[in-house]
Amino acid sequence: MVERLPIFASAARHNFVSSSAFPSARQAGQGALPLSLEFASDQLCRFMPARLKFVAVMAAHVRQSPAPSAFGAPGIEPRWTHSAKEGIGTAYHSSCHVWFTLSHGILNEIYYPTVDQPNTRDAELLITDGESFCHEEKRDLRHEIRYPERNCLHYEIINSEPAGRYRVVKHVLADPHRSVVLMRVRLEVFDEAVRGKLKLYALLAPHLLRGGAGNSGWVCEFAGRRLFHVARESVHLSFGCEPDFTRRSVGYAGASDGWRDLMDNFRMDWEFRAAERGNIALTAELDPSCDEWTLAIALGRSAQSSATKLLQSLADPFEIHREGYVRQWRRAEIGEDYDFSAHTGDEGGMYRLSRCVLLAHEDKLFQGALIASLSIPWGETRSDDEIGGYHLVWTRDLVQSATALLATGQSATPLRALIWLACIQKADGDFPQNSWIDGRAYWSGVQLDEIASPILLAWRLQREDKLPNFDPWNMIAKAARYLLLQGPVTGQERWEEQSGYSPSTLAVVIAALVCAAEFARRRSEDDTAELILAYADWLAAHVEDWTATSRGELVPGKPRHYLRITPADPGAIDPHPNVDAIEIQLANGAGRHPARNVVGGDFLHLVRLGIRDAHDPLVLDSIEVIDRVTRRELPQGPCWRRYNHDAYGQKDDGSAFDGTGVGRSWPILTGERGHYELSAGRDPLTYINVLERMANAGGMLTEQLWDDDDLPCGRWKRGDPTGSAMPLCWSHAEYVSLVRSRRDMVVFDRIGPAYERYVAKPVSSRHEIWTFRHQTCQIPREKTLRLLIATPAVVRWTSDAWQTARDSETNPSGLPDLYFVDLPTADLPVGAAIEFTFRWLEVEKWEGQNFSVTVN
């Protein structure tokens, strides 16, 4: 050690590492050096043949010390892990409050105590012969994943050494009744040359409370067993094994962790007993006298709680837990009446798995809250600042998942979801853009389709006769009132990027209002129903005015088609936008373009929900346009991008989305096309089969697929999942709903009363609607002008430039805090103008401004 000390001085003299970075042993705490080896070794590599030599120097220094603390605090900056999950799981019973994810043959995030809070980055094995190699599971072995049980999220992972010398077989599940993840590990050796030489080491990276920084870990004794204990604020983690670990160490990631220790000389030299307030990693040697072990990771609210759970789980044989875990999931099996295997291409395997995936995304403390995905898109590039990921509740995604479960005959979760939504609804009828499972809003955007979607879920539950004792009218009335006063321009459309007139948003809002009117009629509130329908009719009459161009330039001979969205400023809405001339500024640095030349498949919702006929000429022309512009042929079959110029996705060079990128193909859109084909009278089985082929080895469906040519070195291949969210519940829900729709030969999502009103027996709109948010200034002749306002008022109005004036008092609508008055404009000649103002009755005050609407 003395001979190597001049290396430190040399580095200091050359100003690559300040000498202050190497405090005395007393300053460092009995020899532990509080230094980031990631930084220091990068600097010293200019002088040394290999970075690991510096690690060896530091290791030799630390091994002299009896101190229990690891060096290198606080470790490298923490990152999350890849989003490409091959499996997700949890016990079906609500007493187990852990969820786990799998990818690259290893365990990734463990969520606790709720489905929106990850607490680990990953847990894997290192395998070494102690002399010539050290293999890392996720990078060096070949992975295979299997489902040993049908209808159950129980996994067998087989990680094989490429040369065939050995393999590691793991079974992963959760304790059926405790917050513990269990992993049964078996080593199988095929090469006699390494038999008896291989040692396995477990590595675990805690990220408690959604963060990798600020974690503290120790080796502690509980009930005579030496366990790892990790804590951060109110969450505690215990890590142990049966048979017991033979050696243990707690270190700082990138400095004194087990990976660096073992990769140095293929041996475990460090045994630190503590690493506090940093990005830490746990390392343990599995008993080399055995070839089978059970690893357990338990979480709790105290050290005693997590340790007790862990030891209680390990006290029973793994097989007991496996039998209980499987038995629980069998209680959730699909009933005979909902076994649609004959309508799939794989005998129902993907259908059953997708149902389990959706069920597993429901929280157990806040039941009814289903998150969008147990993943963080491009997580390997995301720091602790990315606390949201996709493990949040989006109302739209929740309703998609709940609707799909309802399609499989599972009504308990959809009903819980509806009640959960009713309880987080704001007083004005709004819903959060997304939220934690306790209802706390995360982002603050306003999306009208998310406010409308719960009404659709309520109607579907009513259609299936699954609303026994819960009356959703309060929620529906508040949501309908919000839609009437705040529509038709949405602050964000379903892709959460743009404000304006969106065909998909308008379709959802129209369908939801028709459903709201149905609920009003069931309550014998016919006048309220008619008022709601009048607004829906007005929207339906203007869909093409607001969202279709007649000057499109994307496909020769097809100038008339739907737009992706017609942009509008929510704070200063143009009630009569010039669709052909307006420009749109796209998100994620995608530039500015004529809105008429930006297209996507959003208009298909008009057909899916029953607002437009599948054979409408405008629909047919729009389909031809998006097929020419956004369709991509993948090895699995056709898929579509969200819209041309989309910049949310993997970059062309394969690097991660970082605020800019290239939007890739979405399996969701293949499912939506299948629903359209069914609406048009064609068999959607082709699209069902394509979705099945899009699933990865573990059956997970992704958010986006790589749709360009293969990149060199196999980095990305055409049809591979990108680094986006996987599994995405929306993708699985789309598949499940499509299977059910094929069985019924009608789209399961279709709103029957809307289809009757706008397709089978079309009605015309008799009103033009004016609100303070959408101040229409033109009215077609023979229409009645209806004013909708939030408080009672007297409307003073004139149609002869104030030569005469009349007062009309507003009427209650039957919805909370919503009033209306109709002004008799139907007999006015073209060119006439009606002017009006308001006297607010609650405060006895005039508005102080006149408004005008012209007959055209």
Image (cartoon, grey):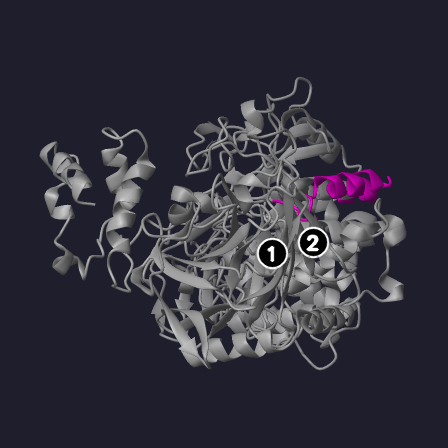
In the figure, residue 227 lies in which quadrant? bottom left
Q: Is residue 783 visible?
A: no
What amino acid type should be assigned to the residue bearing mark 1?
Answer: Asp
User: Residue 404 at what x, y percent from top left?
Assistant: 72, 58
Query: Which numbered disc, 1 or 2, marks the residue that appears first in the sequence?
Result: 1
Relative placement, left or right, of 784 versus 232 is right
Magenta-colored stretch includes residue 680: yes
Given contact means CB atoms under 8 Å apart, are the residues at marks 1 and 2 in contact?
A: yes
Name the quadrant of the C terminus. Answer: top right
The residue labelled by disc 1 is 397
Q: Residue at x 73, y 59 (%)?
A: 355
Q: Residue at x 60, y 56 (%)?
A: 397
Which region shows up in magenta?
675-702
- For the residues labelled 1 and 2, the Cα–Cα distance comes to 9 Å
Name the quadrant of the N terminus. Answer: top left
In the figure, residue 327 lies in which quadrant? bottom right
For residue 354, above or below residue 406: above
The circle on residue 733 is: 2
User: Residue 484 at what x, y percent from top left?
Assistant: 56, 60
What amino acid type should be assigned to the residue bearing mark 2?
Answer: Ala
For residue 270, above or below residue 845: above
**Closest to the observer, 397 or 628:** 397
